[in-house]
Image (spheres, rainbow, N blue to C red):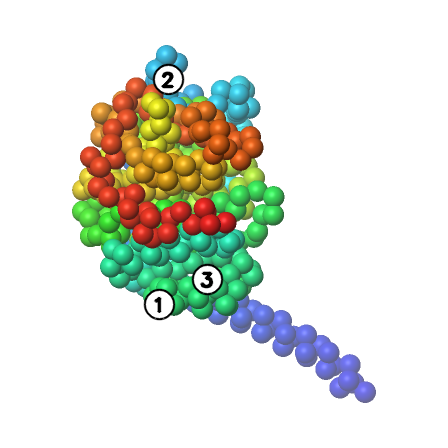
């Protein structure tokens, strides 16, 4: 009988010893840790700048893990106040700066208090310090160069087909990976698309095999898919493209540009600027920058081998914390930019600001497409973000009567002097010029981009024959619906 009573005690003792051995084993094997740990500054080599630990030209570091000592220094920097942050930008009201958010935004009317800003600054710094997924764990999951596209519903997949035809026409050898969610892209659709473009892959963002999980929002735009797509892509060097973006040149040349080789990134500019009192400046410990536009993420190029941790911060801002940050950032696009700002890392960008492309009808200009540039100055992409909201009756009339929707362009004289203010913005078009017999009832209004003080000129001056290319690759698919 005594042995029966002793057995539970022996089992308990054995279990206790096993637990101690298990945790001792984990402490000796870094690969079993859930998160990478940012090292202590005291173990580092001498700093290379006046701020202890910050690495000068940190964007040139060779791999993600080389950034970890720099991150420790970043999270140890003195905090700046909103007043200090906004003092970096001194625009005057009469300059007519085009800001992403209007003056009626709640954080513009009543600036966020320092306690709130400090709390959110501490949150991302804690994430960087304690919760980064180790690069070594997943570095074998991605390799090579390729294009990642987020798509899924019927209309976005039709736009993807246009993009694929454009790449094929350019004889591009870059593989393409489509990121969708759940059952959006059935196997039958994948099979049909592979016939058009054999060098094609598919990734379900809802799958548990992804590096970074993401959810689906049934009520709002799923901006978080784009940061997730970059991190979960099979490619090490990822060119992220929107489905409505058409390359004008083989995008593979971007990977060989001097700018990308140095910075490991290419971020393209948007039409708007970030307000000086936007809370994100102080939260990321960044002084407002006057020669910087917001980011336009219809195209983005990044080397994950170097910026695996930066991308995790962008995804953290855009996923778990989207409800907060989307109050003053417009989704994924500036989550990338401010992740780099937070981590005090410069990013690569083309010298030229965007060029507006659109229609010119009876003196009325409607910019519907952003022409974005290669670092060498050529137009590299035509991102038709506003084209898709123009009524089909208007598109059909422009095509049949006026030669198409790619007629004119506007390019600022200061397109390489980003500190200068260009008066620009969005305006409503009601299509008064459309003949009554071409109308199908009352037309809805749509938005056009405009550079107000810049004259419209024929598109052929900067991009010859793109209307014919647009026809050839099936750009007018919407007229067949």
Disc 2 or 3, which lies upstream in sequence? 2
Residue of label 1:
198
Left or right position of 170 against 426? left
Instruction: Give the residue at x 34% y 18%.
Output: 90
Instruction: Give the residue at x 33% y 56%.
Output: 165
Question: Most extreme residue toward the front, as rendered?
Answer: 437
- Judge by depth and name the residue closer to the eye, 288 or 448: 448
Q: Position of residue 33 (x, y in %)?
A: 47, 62
Looking at the image, can residue 158 be seen?
yes
Instruction: Give the residue at x 30% y 56%.
Output: 167
- Badge nearest the viewer, 1 or 3: 1
- Judge by depth and name the residue closer to the eye, 27 or 419: 419
Q: Is residue 104 above or below residue 346?
A: above
SS of the residue at dot 2? loop
Instruction: Give the residue at x 62% y 71%.
Output: 16
Q: Position of residue 366 (x, y in %)?
A: 38, 29
Q: What is the quadrant of the N terminus in the image? A: bottom right
SS of the residue at dot 1? loop
Asked if labels 2 and 1 touch by Cβ distance under 8 angstroms, the answer is no
Looking at the image, can residue 288 be seen?
no
Residue of label 3:
203
- Badge nearest the viewer, 1 or 2: 1
- Judge by depth and name the residue closer to the eye, 339 or 127: 339
What is the C-alpha distance between the residues marked 1 and 3? Answer: 15 Å
Disc 1 or 3, which lies upstream in sequence? 1
Q: Position of residue 435 (x, y in %)?
A: 45, 29
What is the C-alpha distance between the residues marked 1 and 2? Answer: 49 Å
Q: Is residue 288 above or below residue 147?
A: above
Residue of label 2:
96
What is the C-alpha distance between the residues marked 2 and 3? Answer: 44 Å
């Amino acid at each position: 009988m005594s042995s029966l009573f002793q057995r539970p005690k022996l089992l308990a003792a054995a279990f206790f010893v096993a637990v101690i051995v298990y945790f001792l084993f984990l402490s000796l094997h870094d690969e079993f840790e859930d998160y990478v740990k940012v090292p202590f500054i005291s173990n580092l080599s001498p700093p290379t700048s006046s701020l202890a630990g910050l690495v000068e030209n940190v964007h040139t570091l060779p791999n993600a893990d080389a950034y970890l000592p720099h991150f420790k220094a970043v999270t140890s920097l003195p905090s700046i106040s909103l007043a200090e942050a906004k003092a970096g930008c001194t625009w005057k009201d009469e300059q007519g700066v085009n800001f992403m958010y209007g003056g009626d935004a709640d954080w513009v009317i009543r600036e966020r208090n320092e306690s709130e800003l400090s709390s959110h600054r501490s949150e991302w710094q804690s994430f960087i310090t304690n919760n980064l997924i180790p690069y070594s764990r997943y570095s074998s999951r991605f390799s090579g160069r390729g294009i990642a596209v987020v798509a899924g519903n019927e209309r976005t997949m039709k736009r993807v087909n246009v993009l694929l035809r454009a790449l094929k026409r350019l004889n591009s050898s870059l593989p393409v990976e489509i990121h969708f969610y759940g059952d959006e892209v059935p196997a039958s659709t994948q099979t049909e698309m592979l016939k058009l473009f054999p060098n094609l892959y598919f990734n379900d963002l809802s799958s548990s095999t992804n590096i970074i999980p993401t959810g689906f929002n049934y009520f709002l735009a799923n901006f978080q898919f784009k940061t997730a797509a970059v991190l979960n892509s099979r490619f090490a060097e990822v060119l992220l493209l929107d489905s409505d973006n058409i390359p004008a040149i083989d995008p593979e040349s971007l990977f060989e540009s001097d700018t990308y080789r140095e910075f490991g990134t290419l971020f393209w500019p948007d039409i708007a600027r970030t307000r000086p009192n936007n809370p994100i400046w102080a939260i990321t410990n960044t002084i407002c920058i006057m020669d910087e536009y917001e980011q336009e993420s219809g195209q983005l190029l990044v080397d994950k081998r170097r910026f695996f941790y930066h991308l995790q911060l962008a995804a953290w801002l855009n996923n778990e914390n989207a409800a907060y940050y989307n109050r003053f950032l417009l989704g994924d696009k500036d989550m990338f930019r401010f992740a780099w700002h937070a981590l005090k890392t410069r990013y690569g960008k083309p010298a030229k600001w965007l060029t507006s492309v659109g229609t010119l009808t009876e003196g009325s200009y409607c910019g519907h497409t952003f022409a974005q540039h290669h670092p060498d100055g050529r137009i590299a992409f035509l991102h038709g973000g506003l084209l898709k909201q123009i009524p089909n009756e208007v598109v059909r009339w422009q095509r049949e009567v006026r030669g198409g929707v790619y007629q004119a362009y506007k390019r600022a004289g200061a397109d390489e002097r980003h500190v200068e203010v260009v008066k620009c913005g969005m305006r409503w078009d009601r299509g008064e010029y459309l003949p009554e017999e071409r109308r199908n009832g009352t037309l809805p209004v749509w938005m056009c981009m405009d550079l107000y003080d810049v004259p419209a000129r024929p598109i052929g001056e900067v991009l010859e024959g793109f209307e014919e290319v647009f026809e050839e690759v099936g750009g007018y698919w919407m007229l067949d619906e």
